[in-house]
Image: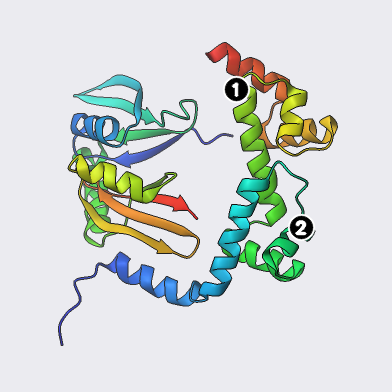
């Protein structure tokens, strides 16, 4: 058994694809039509293109409980997921220059430093640097 | 009384910080230990050396590292060596060169650990990596 895909619910797959590739810097891996305008759409880290894929799934558009759950996490400031980076401050500076909004500036907590951004698709995402 | 604008998550972060991460001296020691491993993984590194360099008793260091990073210093060192070995193999370095470059003392122990942690031998891993290029 292998961990191959993890999913992030998004309110608009095209907007999500632009954000995850053009702002965060991921690379599109799979893009297959699933009917009704939905796609099996995954992105990967440029350094680990054979690593786990992030599935940008349109669940909040079609399944009410998914929409409710996503909003509840967002309103409570809870990140949907997190991505590891080498330098949180550098990523924060790079992304804020690109217009990305953060709800938490880089902050140290124990053995990690992290910051939280808004992915414009309904989620807060945590960037984590191991200290 | 003014209501805090902090989100639920921010309040939880503060709560956990106070509960788990209030001892800054311990944190500084353990972060310095991990950095030492990151910079010296290719040398003859063990708990004895770490204890001497960080001026902390072996068992205290072991206990703290496990508490704050969830694995022992030896487990972290092995992980670091395998991660670096993968980088060197992808770059085309020979298996023997890689073995010594990341701090293993014998080809046998390197190959065994590499296979255990990645599922393939160093040679198989390198062949696959080259084919993908």
Q: Image quadrant of residue A86? A: top left
Label 1: which residue? B90
Q: Residues within 10 Å of mark 1 (few under 14, many from 20)?
A: some
Q: Residue at (31%, 67%) from the top-left corner? A: B10
> What is the secondary structure assignment of the residue under circle 1?
helix
**Residue B118 location, x and y as percent?**
66, 32
Q: Image quadrant of residue A97? A: top left
Chain ID, mark 2: B
**Residue B44 location, x and y as percent?**
78, 46
Q: Residue at (20%, 76%) from the top-left corner? A: B4
Q: Image quadrant of residue B101? A: top right
**Residue A121 location, x and y as percent?**
21, 42
Q: Residues within 10 Å of mark 2 (few under 14, many from 20)?
A: few
**How much space separates mark 1 and mark 2, taking CA atoms?**
30 Å
Q: Is residue B88 left or right of residue B109?
A: left
Which residue is more in the foreground, A67 or B108? B108
- 1 and 2 marks on the same chain: yes
Contact check, label 1 and label 2, Cβ < 8 Å: no
Which residue is more in the foreground, B54 or A65? B54
Classify B78 as above or below B36. Answer: above
Q: Residue at (64%, 18%) from the top-left corner? A: B92
Label 2: which residue? B49
Classify A24 as above or below B9. Answer: above
Classify A11 as above or below B55. Answer: above
Q: Residue furthest bottom?
A: B1
Q: Is residue B98 left or right of residue A55?
A: right
Can residue B37 be seen from the camera position used here? yes
**Residue B130 location, x and y as percent?**
59, 14
């Amino acid at each position: 058994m292998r961990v191959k895909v993890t999913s992030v619910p998004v309110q608009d797959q095209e907007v999500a694809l632009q954000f995850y590739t053009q702002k965060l810097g991921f690379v599109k891996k799979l893009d297959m039509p699933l009917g009704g305008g939905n796609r099996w759409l995954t992105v990967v880290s440029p350094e680990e293109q054979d690593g786990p894929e992030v599935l940008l799934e349109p669940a909040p558009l079609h399944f009410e409980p998914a929409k409710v759950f996503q909003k509840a996490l967002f309103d409570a400031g809870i990140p949907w997921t997190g991505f590891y980076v080498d330098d949180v401050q550098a990523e924060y500076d790079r992304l804020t220059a690109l217009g990305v909004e953060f709800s938490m500036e880089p902050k140290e907590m124990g053995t990690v430093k992290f910051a939280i951004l808004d992915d414009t698709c309904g989620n807060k995402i945590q960037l984590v640097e191991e200290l | 009384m003014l209501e805090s604008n902090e989100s639920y998550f921010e309040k939880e972060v503060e709560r956990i910080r106070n509960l788990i991460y209030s001892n800054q001296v311990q944190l500084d020691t353990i972060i310095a230990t991990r950095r030492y491993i990151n910079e010296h993984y290719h040398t003859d590194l063990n708990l004895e050396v770490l204890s001497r360099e960080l001026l902390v008793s072996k068992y205290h260091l072991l206990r703290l590292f496990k508490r704050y990073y969830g694995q022992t210093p030896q487990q972290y060192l092995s992980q670091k060596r395998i991660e670096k070995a993968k980088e060197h193999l992808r770059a085309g370095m020979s298996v023997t060169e890689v073995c010594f470059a990341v701090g293993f003392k014998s080809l046998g122990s390197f190959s065994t650990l590499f296979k255990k942690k990645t599922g393939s031998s160093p040679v198989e891993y390198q062949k696959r990596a080259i084919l993908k290029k």
